[in-house]
Amino acid sequence: MASRLFHSRIPYHIYIRSFDRGLIFYSTREYLVYFTFITTMARRYRIELMELSIMPDHVHMLAKSLVARNLDLFLTATERLFAREYNATIGRSGSLFEIPGYAPKKTDKKIRSCIAYLFNNQVEKKMVTMAESARWNFMAYAVSDHPFSAPIKLDKASRAMRRAIKLVKFFRAAEKPLGFKTLEKLFSSLGLVEKEQLTDFIISSYNCMDYDSIIAFFGSYEKMRLAVNSNTGSEFDIVETYDTASDAPYSKMSATVSKIEGLEDVKKVMMLDPDLKIRLANKLLQIPGVTARHIQKFLHIRPGSQHLD
């Protein structure tokens, strides 16, 4: 495959859509695995990761590199390694994402607008009401290493929590991402409070986003927060299919699948037999706010092929 035509030292908005427009990120475990893969690869290829926003079926980032070719190598390596890890848990093969779309941001105005646009993805999709309330745009981590949980006090933590923290530190020091089996080992014996604490700890441990560089475009974090929440930003330089439907129902659907089907690893729904998918679809349609389009994306059903339109 020919290298993408990136230029050095220029921030790029990079948009990565799932291979069939369906969900890739069903639960915390998919988000965390991808995050540790992408930050590990960013360090390896010396990518300045300015901003990252992970959505259920696509990813946005603002990134630049001193070596233009490294951006292409970084994107290719991240997709290949994450897909291999992801596919191994559900018995599939092939890519998870389409070829990324990208657009250079050469002026301060365009960079500021892109920053607001990326931070507001979860707001626009009605997953949260304020940009800093979204975990997977990582905005809140600019000012706290535990924005969604209580501080960790090791002297009061469970033995399982102390072991988990030690293991995360080991993998991070070795510059290795966390795979699905490792995450299962880390979280399996923890209660809800410690699971939230460990999620924040993993994100903060692996986080390599250059918050100083994006805050500098606004003057301070508080000014950036106010600007982002008062202006959603815009993107006219990149081809992006925009769906106005809320993404909020996906978390309810994942919870329902776990409960009624006993499917702890929810992403395995994409590999179910077509007849099972239809039976599951009928149950999911009973959830308030869930539409046929939500179900098509959640179960990876081609529009029109299963009479869900």
Image (cartoon, grey):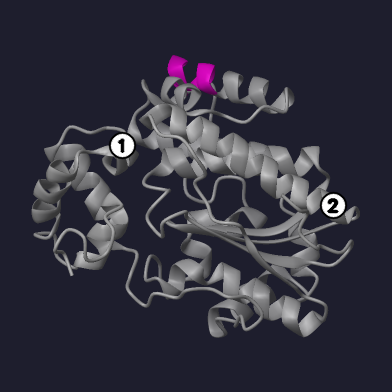
N-term mark: 1 or 2: 2
Number of residues whose C-alpha sits closer than 10 Å to that of mark 1, classed few (under 14), some (14–19) or many (20 or more): some
Q: Which mark is residue 69?
A: 2
Residue 206 screen position, x and y as percent: 66, 38
In depth, the one of 195 and 269 nearer the eye is 269
Could you tell me the amino acid type at mark 1? Lys
- What element does badge 1 sit on? helix
In depth, the one of 267 and 107 nearer the eye is 267
Relative to 268, is 279 on the left or the right?
left
Q: Which mark is residue 223?
A: none
Residue 293 screen position, x and y as percent: 26, 66
Q: Is residue 82 above or below residue 299?
A: above
Q: Is residue 105 above or below residue 16?
A: below
Residue 87 screen position, x and y as percent: 45, 33
> Dot 1 corresponds to which residue?
268
Tell me the quadrant of the picture where the C terminus can be found.
bottom left
Relative to 150, is 220 on the left or the right?
right
Asked if the residues shown at circle 1 and circle 2 are in contact, with their CB atoms under 8 angstroms apart, the answer is no
Is 31 magenta? The answer is: no
Residue 117 screen position, x and y as percent: 59, 75
Residue segment shown in magenta: 157-164
Q: What distance separates the C-alpha of mark 1 from that of mark 2?
A: 35 Å
Is 162 magenta? The answer is: yes
| Residue sitting at x 9%, y 52% | 283
Q: Is residue 151 visible?
A: no
Q: Is residue 246 above or below residue 281?
A: below
